[in-house]
Image: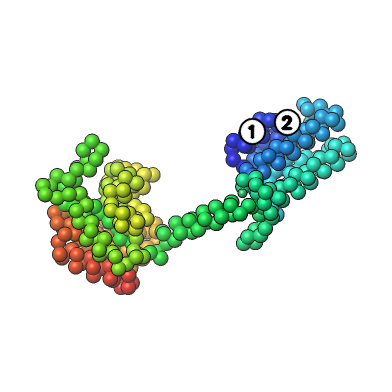
Amino acid sequence: MNEANTRQLYREFPRLYRAASRPTSESAMRWGFMCGDGWFSIVRELSQQIEEAARLAGVDPDSDEWPCAMQVKEKFGGLRFYLSGGYSFELESTIRRLVKAAHEHSLSTCESCGCPATLSEHDHWLRVECARCRAIRLDEQARLTSARSAIAPKYKIVFLDYDGVLHPDHVYQIKGRPVLKVDGFNLFEFSDILIQALKPYPTVRVVLSTSWVHTFCFKKAKAWLPDELQARVIGACYHSSMSAIEWSRRTRYQQIMRYVSRAKLQKEDWIAIDNDPVGWADEYRANLVLTDDDGGLSFTYAQVDLAEKLELLVTNSL
Ligand SMILES: [Zn+2]
């Protein structure tokens, strides 16, 4: 249950939920309500009913005999509500009846949104869920699965530099914007060469190795690319959680190899297009499409090299 709902219940029923401040070794209430927000109303109503029953039974609200919830959770698809014991026989049986009714109510109430729903089994998991919430959950599951597979080496990766690859290597940041200081050229002027080169290989994905990610952030750096290339981008070597100083001390090769090792890529899973060969290890020379600072991908030799290496990449021959 979300924090707002949890806090509301604690605020409305501070005595019933007094065990929430106890260590987890004494009471599971410390974990909060271990069920979905769709059951908030059921839990709230049950809380009111239990306290009302205690009041009618003449229990002093400040005494230890006042009902104390020890754990509220979902189990086998339904709502379970456990209290500490020691009440009078009459109060005990009233509480048992109320908890049972709330449990039955939960079995026909969507645990996520509170709409009418039925108990059903999915992947050996019992759950009360309406059709809409089920669709949302399955959608989210599919999205997560595809996001996970995006970093698995099932895809072939092209590490992409911008400056000296997609346009000449003379880009400066002026007032927060990239400016190319070479007469007669535009930023990303050579992008179409890469788009055409990648066209036969729909499973090839792009990881940004450019310093633009560090300078402008990943989202902005990616947004500069034409749509066809943006659609292939699955990540970047630089991440904002990394120390900027430490990062800038690394060579481009080291920055790329960090990603390679973290994503557990094999030698045959990736190539890099870059104009910076500093420190590049001999054993990975075949993985680098080295471009000219001024000509980038516009030079024929770079295009031939890229075409050959993409072919080797997708045939596992690097
Ligand atoms: Zn629902």
Q: What residue type is labelled 1?
A: Gln
Q: Is mark 1 on a helix, strand or loop?
A: helix
Q: What element carries label 2?
A: loop
User: Alpha-carbon distance for marks 2 and 1?
Assistant: 13 Å
Q: Which of marks 2 and 1 is nearer the N terminus?
A: 1
User: Can you say which quadrant of the picture contains the N terminus?
Assistant: top right
Residue 242 placement (x, y as % from top left): 36, 45
Residue 165 seen anywhere in this rendered image of the structure: no
Q: In this view, does 35 lie to the left or right of 53?
A: left
Q: Tell me the kind of residue under disc 2.
A: Arg
Residue most extreme to the right:
89
Q: Which colour scheme is used?
A: rainbow
Which mark, residue 8? 1
Residue visible at 25% across and 68% down in the picture: 309
Q: Mark 2 points at which residue?
A: 15
In the rendered image, the quadrant that contains the C terminus is: bottom left
